């Protein structure tokens, strides 16, 4: 069994390209072992809020168009 400390934020607002998006109940881990984390990634539910999503792997950027 492993016990870790975390915080539960009731809301988290992320501003992208001038648009605000609020996520409900975000769990924030306090562990320093961030390299092995898989949580905290933006999921498809976030990206579907945009009309166009561009992942440029050559120049390493993400463009979100509303």
Image (cartoon, rainbow, N blue to C red):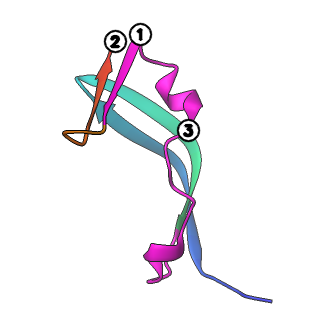
Residue at the extreme left: 59
In the structure shown, which secondary structural element does the residue marked by tag 2 occupy? Answer: loop
Give whichever of discs 1 and 3 has the lower sequence position. Answer: 3
Whether label 2 touches label 1, CB < 8 Å: yes
Q: Is residue 18 left or right of residue 48?
A: left
Residue 41 is a magenta residue: yes
Q: What is the CA distance from the residue labelled 1 to the residue labelled 3?
A: 15 Å
Whether label 1 touches label 3, CB < 8 Å: no
Whether label 3 touches label 2, CB < 8 Å: no
Q: Give the quadrant of the C terminus.
A: top left
Foreground of the two, 14 or 49: 49
Foreground of the two, 24 or 40: 40
Give whichever of discs 3 and 2 has the lower sequence position. Answer: 3
Disc 1 packing (10 Å; few <14; some 14–19; many ≥20): few
Q: What is the CA distance from the residue labelled 3 to the residue labelled 2?
A: 17 Å
**Residue under the image location 73 percent in, 88 percent down:** 2
15 vs 32: above or below: above
Foreground of the two, 59 or 44: 59
**Residue under the image location 18 percent in, 39 percent down:** 59
Give the number of the disc on residue 43.
3
Q: Give the quadrant of the N terminus.
A: bottom right
Foreground of the two, 7 or 3: 3
Q: Quadrant of residue 60?
A: top left
In the structure shown, which secondary structural element does the residue marked by tag 1 occupy? Answer: loop
Q: Give the range drawn in magenta.
A: 29-56
Residue on which the image places disc 2: 66
Q: What is the CA distance from the residue labelled 2 to the residue labelled 1?
A: 5 Å
Residue at the extreme right: 1
In the structure shown, which secondary structural element does the residue marked by tag 3 occupy? Answer: loop
Q: Is residue 53 left or right of residue 22?
A: left
Give the number of the disc on residue 51.
1
Q: Position of residue 47 (x, y in %)?
A: 48, 26
């Amino acid at each position: 069994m492993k016990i870790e400390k975390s915080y539960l934020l009731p809301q988290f607002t992320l501003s992208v390209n001038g648009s605000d998006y609020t996520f409900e109940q975000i769990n924030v881990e306090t562990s320093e072992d961030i390299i092995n984390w898989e949580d905290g990634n933006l999921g498809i539910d976030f990206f579907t809020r945009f009309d166009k999503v561009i992942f440029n792997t050559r120049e390493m950027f993400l463009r979100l168009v509303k």
